[in-house]
Image (cartoon, rainbow, N blue to C red):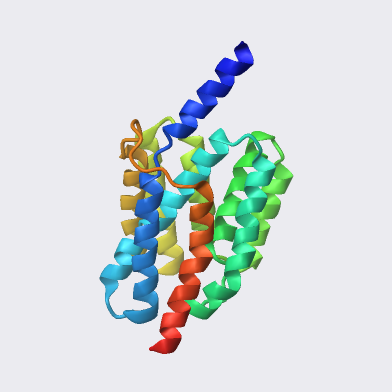
Amino acid sequence: MFQIKKLLKIFQGEQKRDDSLKIIGIVAMIIDHIGIIFFPQISMFRIIGRLVFPIFAFGIVTGYKYTSNADKYFWRIFWFGVLSQIPFMLSIGSYDLNIMFSLSLGLLFIYFWDTKRYLFMSAIIGIIYFVPIEYNFYGLATIFIFYIFQNNKIANVYLQTINSLFYFVFHFTLMQFYALGGVIISLYLPQKNKRLSLNKYFFYWFYPAHLIVLFLVKCLI
């Protein structure tokens, strides 16, 4: 009887999953990539795009919190990063590793924190130092702050602001401060009632698919 109740609880929780936040992230990502490829002179596209990483970083923390298998969760993100790398380079014109690698390394980082494997955490920091990857240390810190302070929204916003300040110091751009909008949306968007729920693999496949479409449009233009 206990197992039946447990399964019903899991099923009900899945039924109430709200993907509104992820959809906001996807829309902002499309706008960002359209701006990079077709309208690089219009800053508003990039400003809207700054919402993307905090939203996906928050999703990684939430996913890790509820996943039944962190190992499979990591490999799923990692391999979709591999699948997306060539479309990413062709469409965006960047040779950095794409956002999926940033998210998968962030996931590993908080997993190693939980399991007290501090040497492996140092190895991830080393990888990010030597390997060009989207959002680099800023991305890693964003995920880690979301995880460590997941029960303290005020501290979360404050530390994410400090994180953006460090990004400014090292990259000499104020653009990443707009990402604080994504932090606030992630922390304060109500998630109590089911509004939109899509197949979880939709979000994985959408990333390489939209890059391929943008590349084809780029070629046609």
Q: Position of residue 177 (x, y in %)?
A: 33, 57
As displayed, is residue 89 above or below residue 117? below
Q: Residue at x 55, y 77 (%)?
A: 89
Name the one closer to the observer, 39 or 47: 39
Q: Residue at x 50, y 74 (%)?
A: 212
As displayed, is residue 210 above or below residue 67? below
Evaluate whether residue 135 shows in this view. no
Quarter occupied by the C terminus: bottom left
Q: Is residue 71 left or right of residue 191?
A: right
Q: Position of residue 170 (x, y in %)?
A: 46, 65
Name the one closer to the observer, 43 or 141: 43
Q: Residue at x 67, y 60 (%)?
A: 127
Q: Residue at x 48, y 61 (%)?
A: 206
| Label total for image | 0
Q: Is residue 29 left or right of residue 181?
A: right
Q: Position of residue 84 (x, y in %)?
A: 57, 67
Name the one closer to the observer, 13 or 186: 13
Q: Is residue 17 left or right of residue 8?
A: left
Quarter occupied by the N terminus: top right
Q: Position of residue 169 (x, y in %)?
A: 42, 63
